Image (cartoon, rainbow, N blue to C red):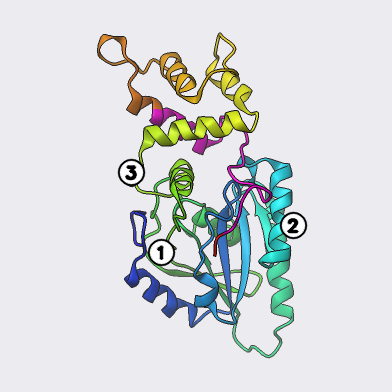
């Protein structure tokens, strides 16, 4: 996949990624803590061959803390080294730096700095992780998928050389559920998914996981919305936010946009979209 995250794969991007991997000793793959298994790249292990791989569950402050704890246990058992990460917390950076220091100390045979790259599908916060590790604005950040434009090396104080690469990994669409979930977190290009259906799907996730009270609080509902269907909640939010079209009809496009932006900003309260005990991984 290239810049502009449409579902599917891109041979050119994967070829460029393979060229970068030849230079690496380690790959740090950034995942969204709310959606760890759906944001993982299923082909990465084959591309890496015997190279090391470390996982970062980014945006942990937007996911449910207890659920993220279970994901950390799952990954450490099934996948490999893993960290939860919040860009605003220095502790998250120190945990990764400590591991990098340890890995470097075990490789005394290297006369050059060890090299690693940070990878991930669009909008999982790859550039935010890079910036925090670099301790400066070395990579631009933003909500728009594919904002990183060109590869650059960044030398870290830990003795590692870090490559920021725009070779974004392809989201893997297992089914309609993953299409909705990836659309909800902003990893797909506008037009690649239905925003209105995705917003209603997202409201159902809040309801099914007992989090609908968070929406009532943020959007200042004046009625008990707990018993409402997602479609009714959607219309209520549109009315509260003044998304009205001709004849007083709710503007679905504007309403969906508000709900999705609020979710991505984290103002609707913590919500994990998938959980280890609910998710059946498909290789």
Q: Looking at the picture, does residue 147 appear above or below residue 46?
A: above
> Residue at image x 45%, y 58%?
172
Q: Nearer the viewer, mark 2 or mark 1?
A: 2
Mark 1 — residue?
166
* Secondary-structure class at tag 2: helix
Measure the alpha-carbon separation of dots 1 and 3. Answer: 19 Å
Q: Single out the residue that lies furthest toward the left.
A: 246
Q: Position of residue 42 (x, y in %)?
A: 51, 66
Return the disc, 1 or 3, that comes first in the chain's sequence.
1
Give residue 169's quadrant in the image: bottom left
Q: Main secondary structure of the magenta part?
A: loop
* Secondary-structure class at tag 1: loop
Return the disc, 2 or 3, that comes first in the chain's sequence.
2
Q: Looking at the picture, does residue 236 appear above or below residue 159?
A: above
Q: Position of residue 257 (x, y in %)?
A: 39, 31
Q: Give the extent of the magenta segment.
A: 256-281
Asked if residue 257 is among those painted magenta in the image, a careful observer would answer yes
Residue 190: numbered disc: 3
Give left or right: position of 1 versus 159: left
Asked if residue 97 is among those painted magenta in the image, a careful observer would answer no
Give left or right: position of 125 versus 72: left
Measure the alpha-carbon separation of dots 2 and 3. Answer: 34 Å
Q: Nearer the viewer, residue 123 or 157?
A: 123
Mark 1 Cα-neighbour bin, 10 Å: few <14, some 14–19, many ≥20 = many
Q: Nearer the viewer, mark 1 or mark 3?
A: 3
> Residue at image x 52%, y 76%?
46
Residue 193: numbered disc: none
Measure the alpha-carbon separation of dots 2 and 1. Answer: 30 Å
Mark 2 — residue?
73
Query: In this rendering, does residue 238 appear at all?
Result: yes
Give left or right: position of 206 versus 262: right
């Amino acid at each position: 996949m290239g810049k502009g995250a449409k579902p599917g794969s891109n041979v050119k991007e994967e070829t460029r990624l393979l060229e970068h991997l030849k230079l690496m000793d380690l790959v740090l793959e950034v995942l969204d803590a709310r959606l760890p298994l759906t944001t993982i790249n299923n082909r990465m292990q084959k591309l890496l061959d015997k190279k090391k791989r470390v996982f970062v569950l980014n945006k942990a402050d937007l996911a449910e803390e207890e659920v993220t704890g279970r994901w950390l246990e799952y990954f450490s058992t099934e996948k490999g080294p893993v960290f939860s990460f919040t860009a605003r917390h220095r502790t998250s950076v120190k945990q990764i730096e400590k591991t990098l220091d340890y890995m470097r100390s075990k490789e005394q045979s290297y006369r050059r700095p060890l090299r690693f790259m940070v990878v991930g599908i669009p909008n999982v916060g790859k550039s935010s992780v890079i910036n925090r590790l670099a301790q400066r604005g070395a990579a631009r950040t933003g909500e728009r998928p594919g904002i990183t434009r060109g590869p650059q090396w960044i030398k870290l104080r830990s003795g590692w050389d870090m490559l920021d690469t725009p070779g974004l990994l392809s989201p893997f669409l297992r089914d309609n559920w993953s299409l909705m979930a990836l659309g909800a977190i902003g990893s797909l290009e506008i037009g690649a998914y239905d925003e209105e259906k995705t917003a209603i799907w997202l409201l159902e996730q809040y309801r099914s996981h007992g989090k609908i009270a968070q929406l009532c609080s943020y959007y200042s509902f004046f009625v008990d919305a707990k018993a409402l269907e997602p479609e009714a909640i959607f219309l209520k939010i549109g009315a509260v936010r003044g998304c009205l079209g001709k004849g007083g009809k709710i503007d679905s496009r504007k309403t969906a946009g508000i709900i999705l932006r609020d979710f991505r900003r984290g103002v609707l309260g913590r919500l994990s979209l998938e959980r280890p005990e609910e998710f059946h991984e498909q290789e």
